[in-house]
Amino acid sequence: MNTIAEVISPEKLLSHWQGHRNLTRRVIEAFPEKDFFEFSIGGMRTFSALTSEILAMGAPAMKGIVEKQETPFQEDSEHLTTKAAYLEKWDKATEQINYYWNQLKVEDFQETFNLFGYYNFPVIENILYLIDNEIHHRGQGYVYLRALGIEPPHFWER
């Protein structure tokens, strides 16, 4: 295959990713404020820390891909202290992802890009990595919510 469009259109892939982002947002919302910042199991990071990682990847990655800037990965230096602040930043990141996505051309998906100076793969593989990473961390959030006695959102309701 030469292009992503042979399997899925760029618009459908973005919709798929945004569906996952919508679901992850609902997982953030499901956490009690205190537990979002403090609860963990077995030494794993808190869900606020996992969310910080997701935020440090999605929009910055899309910006780097579009602007062809191989900037190193940096966890967010902002120290957000409320769940509401995380949700606000989440929504802004979603807008940024959409903004940069709309600047991609179909042929860009096959170009190799060294994302964060570490993931030297075709753009499509970098984007799939971003989606997979979010799903992985959201799964940790599901475990936390269940341990807290909270029913997480259904994973298929994106």
Image: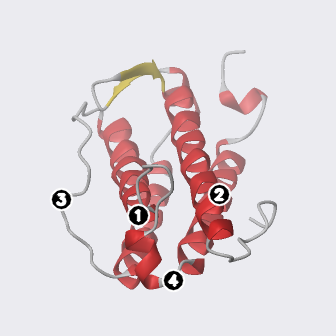
Q: Are marks 2 and 4 in contact (CB under 8 Å)?
A: no
Q: Which mark is residue 93?
A: 1
Q: Earlier in the sequence, mark 2 or mark 4?
A: 2
Gap between marks 1 and 4, in whole Å?
22 Å
Relative placement, left or right, of 154 versus 152 is right
Mark 4 closeness class: few <14, some 14–19, many ≥20 residues within 10 Å: some
The image position of residue 38, as x and y in percent, is: 39, 70
Residue at screen point 49% across, 31% down: 126
Question: Does residue 65 lie above or below 100 as drawn?
Answer: above
Q: Assign a secondary structure to mark 4.
A: loop
Residue at the disc numbered 2: 20
Quadrant in which the N terminus appears: top right
The image position of residue 79, as x and y in percent, is: 21, 69
Furthest residue toward front: 42
Q: Earlier in the sequence, mark 1 or mark 4?
A: 4
Residue at the disc numbered 4: 32
Q: Are marks 1 and 4 in contact (CB under 8 Å)?
A: no
Amino acid type at circle 4 is Pro
Depth order, front residue of 2/123: 123
Gap between marks 3 and 1, in whole Å?
15 Å
